[in-house]
Image: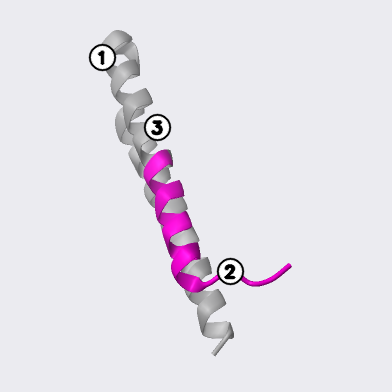
Amino acid sequence: MTEQPSTAMALAEDHRNDMLSNSVAILGACLSYYAPPFWWTDATGAAILIALFLCGGEQTLEERHAHR
């Protein structure tokens, strides 16, 4: 398989992150609003996303540094 251009890969990662963050935000907000005992889901989802995005960003940096 051929290697995709870095611009296309960056856009694909950005779109994936946007879809994931929007989905978690909607789910967390709906749970917090419609099920008050789950008020913590919005903030917890955001914290989990931050951790995932940081790990993904670190992996991307390591890959790009290895190719230099």
Q: CA distance from mark 3 to mark 1?
A: 15 Å
The image position of residue 32, as x and y in percent, is 29, 18
Most common SS among magenta residues = helix
Q: Is residue 46 above or below residue 5?
A: above
Q: Is residue 19 above or below residue 11?
A: above
Viewer-closest of 23 and 10: 10
Q: Earlier in the sequence, mark 3 or mark 2?
A: 2
Name of the residue lying farthest toward the left? 33
Residue placed under numbered mark 1 in the picture = 33
Q: Earlier in the sequence, mark 3 or mark 1?
A: 3
Amino acid residing under circle 3: Ser
Residue placed under numbered mark 3 in the picture = 23
Amino acid residing under circle 2: Gln
Q: Residue at x 49, y 59 (%)?
A: 56
Crowdedness near tag 3: few (<14), some (14–19) or many (≥20) residues, C-alpha within 10 Å:
few
Q: CA distance from mark 3 to mark 2?
A: 27 Å
- Which of the 4 quarters of the picture holds residue 46? top left
Q: Is residue 29 visible?
A: yes
Magenta stretch holds residue 68: no
Q: Is residue 16 above or below residue 68?
A: above
Q: Which mark is residue 4?
A: 2
Q: Is residue 12 above or below residue 57?
A: above
Q: Earlier in the sequence, mark 2 or mark 1?
A: 2
Magenta stretch holds residue 11: yes
> Range of the magenta residues?
1-19
Crowdedness near tag 1: few (<14), some (14–19) or many (≥20) residues, C-alpha within 10 Å:
few
Disc nearest the viewer among 2 and 1: 2
Disc nearest the viewer among 3 and 2: 2
Q: Is residue 40 visible?
A: no
Q: Secondary structure at mark 3?
A: helix
